[in-house]
Image (cartoon, rainbow, N blue to C red):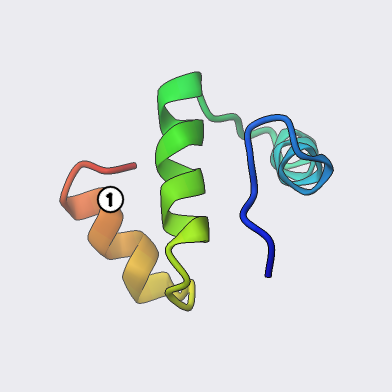
Amino acid sequence: MNKLKIDSEEFNRILKNLHLENLSLNPTLQKIALEIINSGVEITPTVIKGALHRGKI
């Protein structure tokens, strides 16, 4: 899978979907989310919760 970038169409689609759910990410959180997405780790509720607890998101 290609690495996503802030200005990539796929990442913009993610942000748009979040907006439809009345959610948003500030630019700092967008960068952190990209790091997690591009890390190659399977994104699971556990990964998301771990990032939240470590203060990454």
29 to the left or right of 3: left
Against 25, is 45 above or below?
below
Residue type at mark 1 is: Leu
Q: Which of 38 and 28 is in front in this view?
A: 38
Number of numbered discs overlaid on the protein picture = 1
In percent of width and height, residue 20 lies at 80, 38
Q: What residue lies at 42% left-to-right and 72% top-to-bottom?
A: 45
Name the image quarter holding the N terminus: bottom right
Label 1 neighbour load within 10 Å: few <14, some 14-19, many 20+: few
Q: What residue lies at 51% left-to-right and 58% top-to-bottom?
A: 38
Q: What residue lies at 53% left-to-right and 29% top-to-bottom?
A: 25
Q: Which of 6 and 47 is in front in this view?
A: 6
Q: Nearer the viewer, residue 8 or 13?
A: 8
Give the residue furthest to the left.
54
In percent of width and height, residue 27 lies at 50, 21
Which quadrant would residue 51 be assigned to in this image?
bottom left
27 to the left or right of 13: left
Give the residue furthest to the front.
2
47 to the left or right of 11: left
Name the image quarter holding the C terminus: top left
12 to the left or right of 40: right
Against 53, is 22 above or below?
above
Q: Is mark 1 on a helix, strand or loop?
A: helix
Against 22, is 39 above or below?
below
Residue on which the image places disc 1: 52
Q: What residue lies at 48% left-to-right and 78% top-to-bottom?
A: 42
